[in-house]
Image (tube, grey):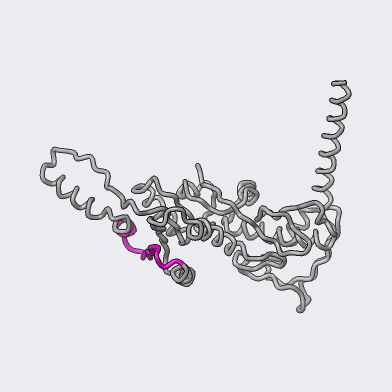
Amino acid sequence: MKFYLAIIIACLIFFISSCSSISKNEISKQKLKLNIQTNSINKERIIEILLKDKINFDVNFTNNNSYFLEDDVLNSNLNFFCNSLLQDEREVIEKTLFKNKKDLNKKILIIYTKKFDDLVLTLKKRYPYEEYFILDTRDYETQIQKILNIDKSIIKNKRLSTLDTKIQISHTPRVRNDILSIYFITDYNTGKTVVPIFKSYALNINYYSSSEIFHDATDIKKLVDFEGTFIPITKKVLENLNNTQLTTIKSEIEKTLVKDFLTIEKIRQNSLFKNRIKPDSGNLSIEKNSCVARDLNFWKITS
């Protein structure tokens, strides 16, 4: 009896795995007809992706009445998606930090640069009781010491040290205890400098950012500057970054988004909804009668 049961189970496993492989290969056997307007970079991406997929395709870039794929892919509400990628990232951060805030007695610190004034102005209107600090391009270290309320402690320690230079005073400045989390809204050049400074003073605080903080990095290994920071991004996007020779991380994420757009076109044109395929930039399957929601979760950057 056990022998026959083992055979039945083996057959079932084979059947399931066969179905799975068929569903993965099914897309590449389909046809795609596309009328689209976009810039030269996105045209190259589209052709490269379709050739790699080995799919039968017919693409027309000259029809002026066709869908327009914007230059700024990351902020674009791509066809069939509910929101842009960056909007989805910011919404999941906002939900976690502000809407689902667990300790109302503590503050969220929003650290930003002038480039993001408009975004932060919206947050200030929604969440006026949090603390917002704009960084300029001068002395980051001094600014951060003031934000964390450790500047006076450091000055006092320096004065004590001058009283007797033969004595070495061990000093760990006490960071303010009313901080729940820190939300960085900066570009790469600022972020790679200020995040390590914050972490050197305040280790036991959760740090959050959108992927925008490392978009201009040219090597995924450079993300070590942001170790411990929570980023809303999918595992598949990270795998795509790991498997390519990067120009910039931003460029590769844009390419992933173009690939998602083409995947949805293939699914819709060939009625492949039953395969429950997920876009690389999201965690939810593509549905027939609704826009594509990404439902992002957090990845904690580790070395």
Q: Residue at x 48, y 60 (%)?
A: 98
Q: Is residue 8 left or right of residue 71?
A: right
Q: How many marks?
A: 0
Along the line of sight, which residue is nearer the eye, 75 or 224? 75
Q: Pick the quarter of the image with the N terminus.
A: top right
Toward the left, the furthest residue is 163
**In this rendering, is residue 72 above or below 24?**
below
Picture coordinates of residue 208, whole percent (x, y):
48, 54
Q: Is residue 65 magenta?
A: no
Q: Residue at x 56, y 58 (%)?
A: 92
Q: Is residue 33 left or right of residue 124?
A: right
Picture coordinates of residue 277, whole percent (x, y):
75, 52
Picture coordinates of residue 191, whole percent (x, y):
44, 57
Q: Residue at x 69, y 70 (%)?
A: 69
Magenta-tinted stretch: 127-143
Picture coordinates of residue 122, whole percent (x, y):
48, 71
Q: Is residue 197 left or right of residue 260?
A: left
Along the line of sight, which residue is nearer the eye, 208 or 104? 104
**What is the quadrant of residue 117 in the picture?**
bottom left
Along the line of sight, which residue is nearer the eye, 149 or 210? 149
Toward the bottom, the furthest residue is 64
